[in-house]
Image (spheres, rainbow, N blue to C red):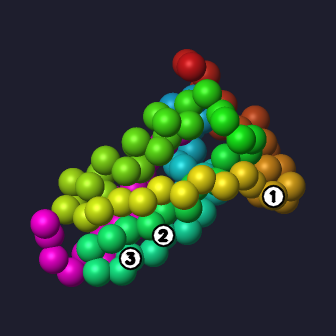
Amino acid sequence: MAKNISKEDVQNAIAQIKHPAIDSTLVDLGIVKEVSVKENKVTIVMAFPFPFIPIGDYLVNSVKNPIENLGAEVEVKITVMDENERQRFFALEEKNWKGGI
């Protein structure tokens, strides 16, 4: 297990992860909502526009894997975007849609 994993290490590891159908990162889309690090345990809060989105597991794993590669234990908590977050997500989705799913 790696030692002294910082919040910055985690943020750098996931900063460039893009949505598979939208040319935007998960951070920019507001899907990665919170990152917290306590010792070598990382908690990520991910917000989806709706409960039970079809690619939810894919998105969770795309965030979880690079953090685990740092040697951290990862817990992902899922929540649903509030109305403002959802509207921002939809605006970016419309602007940056590339399709493919």
Q: Quadrant of the C terminus?
A: top right
Determine whether the residue tagged by mark 1 lies in a helix, strand or loop: loop
Comparing 79 with 82, the one in front is 79
Which residue appears at 33% of the width and 71% of the height? 41
Is residue 32 something that shows in the picture?
no
Distance from disc 2 to disc 3, alpha carbons, whole Å, reads 7 Å
One can see residue 78 in this view: yes
Determine whether label 1 and label 2 are within 8 Å by CB. Answer: no
Q: Is residue 15 left or right of residue 52?
A: left
Give the number of the disc on residue 92: none
Q: Residue at x 60, y 53 (%)?
A: 78
Q: Amino acid at mark 1?
A: Asp
Q: Amino acid at mark 2?
A: Val
Q: Secondary structure under badge 2?
A: strand
Label 2 close to label 3 by CB (< 8 Å):
yes
Image label count: 3
Residue 9 x/y as whole percent: 30, 70
Where residue 12 sits: x, y (%)? 35, 64
Q: Is residue 71 above or below residue 31?
A: below
Percent of width and height locating residue 20:
51, 32
Q: List the single residue furthest toward the top.
A: 100
The disc labelled 3 sits on which kind of residue? Val
Look at mark 1 in the image and give the residue it sits on: 82
**Residue found farthest to the right:** 83
Q: Residue at position x 13%, y 66% from top?
A: 1
Q: Which residue is mark 2?
A: 35
Which numbered disc flags the more N-terminal residue, 1 or 3? 3
Residue 37 image label: 3
Residue stretch rendered in magenta on the structure: 1-19
**Mark 3: few, some, or many residues within 10 Å (few <14, many ≥20)?**
some
User: How many C-alpha atoms fall within 10 Å of the one at disc 1: few (<14), some, or many (≥20)?
Assistant: few
Answer above or below: position of 33 versus 8: above
